[in-house]
Image: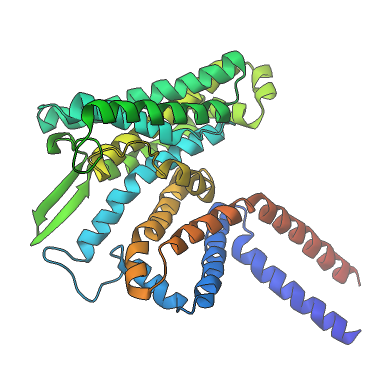
Amino acid sequence: MREKSVGKRKENVLAKFFLKSIGNERWQHITIPIFLIFLSFFAASIIILALGKNPLGAFYNLLQGVGILPKPSYAAYKSMLTDFLSLLNYMTPMVFASLAVSIALKGGLFNIGVSGQMLLAGFIASITVGYSSLSRIVAKPLVLAIGIIAGGILGGLIGFLKYKFNINEVVSSIMFNYIIQYVLSFFIHSYYIDPVSRQSKYIADTARLTLVNVEMFGLKMDISIGFVIAIILAIALKVFFHKSRLGFEIKAVGANPKGAKYAGINVGRTMILTMVLSGVFSGLAGVTYYLGYFASIQPKVLPSVGFDAIAVALLGNTNPYGIIGASFIISIIDRGSTYMSSMAGVRKEIASVITGMILLFTACTAYIQHKIRDNKDKLSYMARKEAEE
């Protein structure tokens, strides 16, 4: 009996420690994702060990590859700073795309067509502004405006089909992905193909949302204009959902459409506006991807960013601030995998495995929250029982 009681006390101590670490409801949107990321890297470590490699060394190389830790040597005009700025440039479309997914999720919708919306916005901006002779002062804002309009129209169309004809947004989004992918591929191959790269022709630097090879401090840096815009809009989105009437209506419709309708909210209009707003951010992701990080479009290929954004939005708990942090972590994994592969001898695919595990564990968030509440109830019951004895 004594050994049994000692065992129970040890279990209680572990449970209390676990609950104290991630059980605070106020901080769960931060603590649970961190716990899930830790689990993902722990699982990846087991795989790397099974391959006969050192996981700590591999993760160290991962951070070296993105400018968080120093490399042994650098090429001319390169340093930790240039690597880190390249990471932020790579991360920018991910932030926009993840915000697009989160907006739809808050409205009770699932925008799986972010990649198609990105491709459409990037293509239209490329052929209208990217190949023009407009000055940079006019071209760059125009690229952003086209991204907003193109993405918003396609997102709104998906929302309209959902409202008017009850066509599931997942089905219509996937169909639009295929339509856009192959129709635009036809136009690129017919009119805009580069015979050398077999991609679309490169856009003019004046229209590009990344300032390439900017010479400063004896270095050549790639500076993303879109990154600053992404951070500002993420903050604005946080305020929008907490302070504005439309933000409240979107959350109300997402939580309970019937209850929202009973409360006098126009559910159809709100549904369409939700997808318009989601499409706007998808369009911004598209122009910062195809006219920012890249300067051309690869035919017949949808950007993987649109699908990775689902994992990032879930990991960030659909919170704009959480999404910025989650985008940073996923971008480190994706961007640093090449250097990790060359230095540690660990295949690049391990990075995809880690991302997949993060998505898998993130899907368990609701279960973890349930177990936390369950354990809290058990501990409080046992505490009352001990006090009575």
Image coordinates of residue 25 in percent, x first then y, are 62, 53
On screen, residue 382 above or below 149: below
Q: Which quadrant, please, contains the N terminus?
A: bottom right
On screen, residue 213 above or below 225: below
Q: Quadrant of residue 211?
A: top left
Image coordinates of residue 153 in percent, x first then y, are 40, 20
Q: Quadrant of residue 121?
A: top left
Q: Which quadrant, please, contains the C terminus?
A: bottom right
Q: Residue at x 35, y 71 (%)?
A: 61
Q: Residue reaching furthest bottom?
A: 2
Image coordinates of residue 77 in percent, x first then y, are 11, 63
Q: Residue at x 21, y 24 (%)?
A: 128
What sort of colour scheme is used for the picture? rainbow
Q: Left of 37 or right of it: where is 257?
A: right
Q: Does residue 281 appear in this view?
A: no
On screen, residue 383 above or below 169: below
Q: Does residue 190 appear in this view?
A: yes
Q: Left of 379 or right of it: where is 155?
A: left
Question: What is the number of callouts on the image?
Answer: 0
Image coordinates of residue 82 in percent, x first then y, are 20, 59
